């Protein structure tokens, strides 16, 4: 499993700089959560790791490899979004298989991978259904299945649960935790939900205006926030 290393990462849109030189070392298998107010640069940072935004300055490594100029599909990362955009005309099985198909994986291998992932996510009984015939939680599971099936080195999550109701959010949070324990994939997870951050994170990164304000374990941040801004983002201990 690979870690992720960000050194002096900067993002500019024309003359506007929105991420001002972020340094962050994420260990292999670590679960890191980015929190901070809307517009502070969480998604931009995640999208630079994914390769969906060009890095203006600095170096991004996945494992030992500098990936600044590597295309998203060649980075060994999988991203799960808030708007998980399943293909409505495709079955659950085909939605999960989609990431493999575009890589020309052999058919038999696709079938066994889809079966395995469906088993892990409790979707075996739903493989022939269309997304419209699933609950919100099931759809989110399919979206995760699509990410997992590729056996990525790194999972990137951008507020994946924010469209779900409170009960489902709690359930899916537990599911993500269980998946991380089982698969041990290095994960970077963006959220504005304190409970999610406190329960999922090995370490929390608190961001503000395109900079890192503080990094620490949930307990470190809870016990020793550097300022009231950080304290405001840290909920109760897990
Ligand atoms: P967050 O995910 O923390 O809410 P974002 O990373 O989406 O924040 O955005 C960080 C900042 O970058 C915001 O001020 C946003 O308006 C700006 N931004 C994002 N995308 C663009 C873009 N394509 N062009 C110009 N500014 C952008
Ligand atoms: Mg965002």
Image: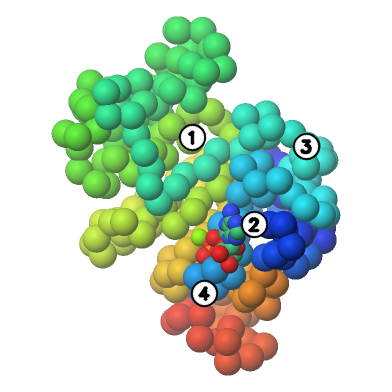
Give the mark nearer the N terminus: 2 vs 1: 2
CA neighbours of label 3 inside 10 A, class few (<14), some (14 to 19), many (20+): few
Q: Work out how far the residue at label 4 is from the one at label 3, CA to CA, in angstroms.
A: 29 Å
Residue behind mark 1: 148
Q: Work out how far the residue at label 3 is from the one at label 1, CA to CA, in angstroms.
A: 24 Å
Residue 37: mark in rendering? 4
- Mark 2 C-beta to ligand 1 under 8 Å: yes
| 187 relative position to 122: left or right | right
Give the mark nearer the N terminus: 4 vs 2: 4
Residue 45: mark in rendering? 2
Q: Work out how far the residue at label 3 is from the one at label 2, CA to CA, in angstroms.
A: 16 Å
Q: Quadrant of the C terminus?
A: bottom left
What residue occupies the far left of the structure in this picture?
133
At x 82%, y 41%, the residue is 66
Is 175 rendered above or below residue 74?
A: below
| Location of residue 35 by image quarter | bottom right
Measured from the top left, where is residue 42 in percent x and y?
58, 62
Q: Work out how far the residue at label 4 is from the one at label 2, CA to CA, in angstroms.
A: 14 Å
Give the mark nearer the N terminus: 3 vs 2: 2
Give the mark nearer the N terminus: 1 vs 4: 4
Badge nearest the viewer, 1 or 4: 4
Residue behind mark 3: 69
At x 58%, y 83%, the residue is 230
Is 32 rendered above or below residue 139?
A: below
Tag 1, which secondary structure?
A: helix
Q: Work out how far the residue at label 2 is from the one at label 1, CA to CA, in angstroms.
A: 21 Å
Give the mark nearer the N terminus: 3 vs 1: 3
């Amino acid at each position: 499993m690979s870690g992720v290393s960000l050194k002096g990462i900067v993002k500019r849109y024309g003359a506007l700089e929105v991420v001002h030189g972020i340094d962050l070392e994420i260990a292999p298998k670590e679960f890191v959560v980015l929190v901070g107010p809307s517009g502070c640069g969480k998604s931009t940072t995640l999208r630079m790791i994914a390769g969906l935004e060009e890095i203006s300055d600095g170096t991004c490594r996945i494992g030992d490899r500098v990936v600044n100029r590597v295309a998203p599909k060649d980075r060994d990362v999988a991203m799960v979004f808030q708007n998980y955009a399943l293909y409505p005309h495709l079955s659950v099985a085909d939605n999960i298989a989609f990431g493999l198909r575009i890589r020309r994986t052999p058919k038999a291998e696709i079938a066994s991978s889809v079966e395995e992932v469906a088993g892990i996510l409790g979707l075996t009984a739903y493989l022939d259904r269309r997304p419209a015939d699933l609950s919100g939680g099931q759809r989110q599971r399919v979206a995760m299945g699509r990410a997992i099936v590729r056996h990525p080195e790194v999972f990137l999550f951008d507020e994946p649960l924010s469209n779900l109701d409170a009960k489902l959010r709690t359930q899916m949070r537990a599911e993500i935790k269980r998946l991380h324990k089982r698969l041990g994939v290095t994960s970077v997870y963006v959220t504005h939900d304190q409970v999610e951050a406190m329960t999922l994170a090995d370490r929390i990164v608190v961001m503000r205006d395109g900079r890192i304000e503080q990094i620490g374990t949930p307990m470190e941040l809870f016990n020793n926030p550097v300022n009231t801004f950080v304290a405001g983002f840290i909920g109760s201990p897990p």
